Image: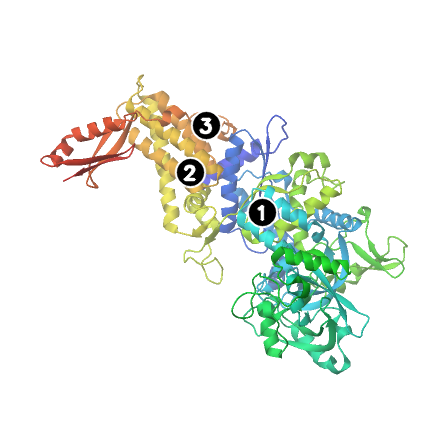
Amino acid sequence: MANYGKHTDLKWQKKWEDSGVFKFVENKEKEKLYVLEMFSYPSGSKLHAGHWFNYGPTDSWARMKKMQGYNVFQPMGFDAFGLPAENFAIKTGIHPMDSTLKNIETMEKQLKEMGAMFNWDHEVVTCAPDYYKWTQWLFTELYKNGLAYRKKAPVNWCPSCNTVLANEQVVDGACERCQTLVVKKDLTQWFFKITKYADELLEDLDKLDWPEKTKSMQKHWIGRSYGSQVSFKVQDKDLDFSVFTTRVDTLFGVSYVVFAPENDMVKELTTPEHQAEVEAYIEQAKMQNEIDRQSLSREKTGVFTGSYAINPVNGRVIPIWVGDYVLNTYGTGIVMAVPAHDERDYEFAKKYELPIERVIEGGDALPYTEVGPMVNSGEFNGLQGDEAKEQVTKWLQDRGQGELKVNYRLRDWLVSRQRYWGAPIPVVYCDHCGEVVLEEKDLPVELPYDVEFAPDGKSPLAKSEAFLHTTCPKCGGPATREADTLDTFVCSSWYYLRYVDNKNADAPFDKEKINTMLPVDKYVGGPEHAVMHLLYARFITKALRDMGYLSFDEPFKSLTHQGLILGPDGQKMSKSKGNTISPDEYITQYGSDVFRMYLMFGFSYAEGGAWSDEGIRSVSRFVDRVERNFHNIRDILHSSSSTEDLRSEDKDLLYWNANAIKGVTEDSEKMQFNTAIARMMELTNALTKYIPMEKHNHEVLKKVTLDFIRILAPFAPHFSEEIWEMFGHEGSVFDESWPAFDEKALVKDEVEIAIQINGKIKERIMIPSDANDEEIKALSLATAAIQKETDGKTVVKVIVIKGRLVNIVVK
C-alpha cells in the first residue's frame, strides 16, 4: 500500500512555493524566532549527507516551533568566496565565478528537494557584488574606528596554498585546508584589532547557551593570564626589554634570558663575532612550525648573542640567548629563564652549561615547578604564592622596573590573503596621500573576471594592470590598489545580519529591522568553527554595537553542534575512500522524508555515527507501516459505527498518544530527535494493536490520528501534508497548532507488573495504578501461578518496586 515517494515530495514542494506558506512576514503579535544553520561552501561538490544532518533536523525543530506559534525566520545562503572554490577552479580550469554560480544553482535545487522551509527571498551569496560591497564597507568602518590597521609582521605561510593563514587556520603546525606544514614569512598585512575585545569576548561566554566544550575552546584561545612585566637593562648598551612572567617569585633564580628568533631586538643585541651564527639560526627557525618548537619532547636549541642583561633584583649579569622554543607571539617574545623551576629552562641550561640556582624551597630534585617558600631571595625569603608575587612586583614597581600585567594568547586577526577569489580590500596607495581607505560611495571595488588566478605566491590581482592602476580619491593623482583580498571569514562574520535586510541597496541593513530580529535564537553548525567563525562573528557584533549600529552584545544566543555522519565503514567520508553517501540517490529511492527521518532516528544528533543502508530501509518500513495505519483508520472512520463509552482499550490508546506528544515535544526541544521518533514508534505500535479491534471509539481514534499527524509533520513534512489532506483538510498542517497532551491521560487505571520468585519472573498481572504496597503484595500472592510456585515453601520477604515488579523471596 506504500504510496509515499519522491512524487509526494514534488507535489508538496510546488504547493508550498505557490502558496508561500513558509515566507517570512513580520508579525508583532507573534514572538520571532531566528533559526539559522551555518551556510554552505559551494566549492565544487553537491550537498552530502553531512549537510543534510545539519539542515534537515534543524528544519524539523524550526517547523515544530512554527506550529507552537513562533514567527520563524529561517534564511539560507552560500559562503561563496575562499580557498575551496578557488582550488576547485584551479583543479578543473573553470573560472571560480562560473563554477561557484553553477554549484549554487545545483545546491539550491538540492536544498529545495529537502523540503526545508528556508526563506529563499532572504538568500545571500557572499561573492555577489551587492553583498561584498558591504563586506568592504565593514572594513572601512573598522578602519575609521581604529580596528583595522596594516603592519609588517611574521605571518603563517602555506607553501602549498601560496597564501597567508590566520593563527586559527593553523592546526598542529599545518594548514587546516591542505595539511602542509606552515612556515613563517615577513609580510606587510592587514589586521583587525580583535584583541581590543579580549576581555569582553572572554567574560560574555558565560551568558551564552553554548556547548561547554566550545566555550572552553574560546577561553583557551583567548588565553588570559595574570602576571608581572619585568624590565631588564642590557649591559653596556642603552637598551632595555620587558619580560612577562606568571612566576615573578622566581626572579632571583633567573640565570639567562632567551629571545624568540623573530624578536625585533635580536639584531641589535647580537655582537659582530656572533652575527653569522645568530643569522643562520634565525633562518633555520623560520622553517620550523610553532607546534614543533613548543614540543616538550623536542631537544631545545639556541645560540648566544654575545650580549648580557642585568637582573633587576640582584644585579646579576646574565647572558642573552636566542632559542626557538620561545615564541614571539606570546608575552613579549622573551623568556626569563629560571632553570631550577622550569622544565624547558632546565633542559636548556643543562645542555649549554648555564647556572641553575634554587630559589623556591620544595621537592627532592630539580626542576621543582610547584609553589613554595622563596629562598636565596634576600628580603623576600620565606614568602610564597600570591603574597610573594605581590611583594616582588611592588618592589619592582616602586623602582620603575616592573608592574602587574594581564597577558593574552589571542592575537589580532590577520585578514589579508594572497588569493584571487575573495572580496578586494578597499584601499589604494598614493605617493602623495599614502594609504587611502575608500569611502562608501566608491564601493564596491569589484573583483575583475579576467585574472590569472593560479597561485604563485604573488597576489593574483597584482597581475591585473587594469585592476591595479587607479586614481586616488583624495588628490586625483595616480594610485595603486591593494592587491590582497579579504579572508573569507570576514564575509561570514556578518552574514547573519544581512539576511534580515538582504535587498537593501543603501545600507548593509536597516538598524530598526536588525535590532528587532537579532540576535539569532538558535544557531546550528559544526564544532570545527569554535575559534574561527564563531569568535570572529562575536567580535564583529561587538564592534558594530560600539559604532552604534547594533543594540545587542552577542550574535548567537543558543548554539548546537551536530555530530559527524561517517561512511558505512565508520571512516570520515571522502571520494578517495569511495565511502561518500549521495542524498540524491536515496531521495529518488525512498523520498526525502525517509532520508530525513533516518538521519534523525539512526544517530544521536550531537554525536553522529556510521551510515547504514539497513537503517534507512528500516525507517522506510516504519513510514510504510504508519501509512497503512492511516489508510485503515480512514476506512474505519468512514464505514463502521462508533462506541460511545470510553473503554480500557481507548484509555490505553489515549495514554500512548499523550506519552508520544509529551516525549516528542520534550525530546525535540533538546534536539534529541532519535528518542522523539522512538515515542512515535510506540504510538504506532499502539495504533497497530487498536485498529484490528471489532469496536472503536471514533472520537478517540480521530483525536489520536490528528495529533499523530501534527507531531509527525516536522519529521516527515511531505508525507504528513499528504495524510492531512487525505483526512479532508484544505490548509497546510503547518498552519495548525502543536498538540497539547492531557496529563490525566498519562495516569493509567491499571499497570502491568512482573512478579518474581527469588529474582526470576514467574507471572505478569495487571493491577490498579493507585494500589498501595500492601494491596500489591496481596494481589501478587493471590494469583494461581504464584500460589502454585510457593506451595509448601516459606515466604521470607515480599519486595515491592511500585509500578514495575514484585520480588517474592521464598525458602
- Picture layout, residue 644 above or below residue 541: above
Picture disc at residue 676? 2
Q: Is residue 217 visible?
A: yes
Which residue in the protein does label 1 denote? 38
- Picture layout, residue 639 above or below residue 102: above
Which residue in the protein does label 3 denote? 739
Figure quadrant of residue 398: bottom right
What residue is shown at x 65% (from left), y 41% (from top)?
A: 499
- Residue 704 pos. (x, y %): 38, 27
Quadrant of the snapshot with the C terminus:
top left
User: 10 Å neighbourhood of mark 1: few (<14), some, or many (≥20)?
Assistant: many
Dot 2 falls on a residue whose secondary structure is helix
What residue is shown at x 38% (from left), y 48% (from top)?
A: 615
- Residue 148 pos. (x, y %): 76, 53
Of 687 and 718, which appears nearest the observer?
A: 687
124 sits left or right of 677 in the view: right
Of 255 and 205, which appears nearest the observer?
A: 255
Of 756 and 641, which appears nearest the observer?
A: 756
Q: Is residue 82 visible?
A: no
Of 698 and 649, which appears nearest the observer?
A: 649
User: 10 Å neighbourhood of mark 3: few (<14), some, or many (≥20)?
Assistant: some
Q: Tell me the kind of residue under disc 3.
A: Pro
Extreme residue in the left direction: 792
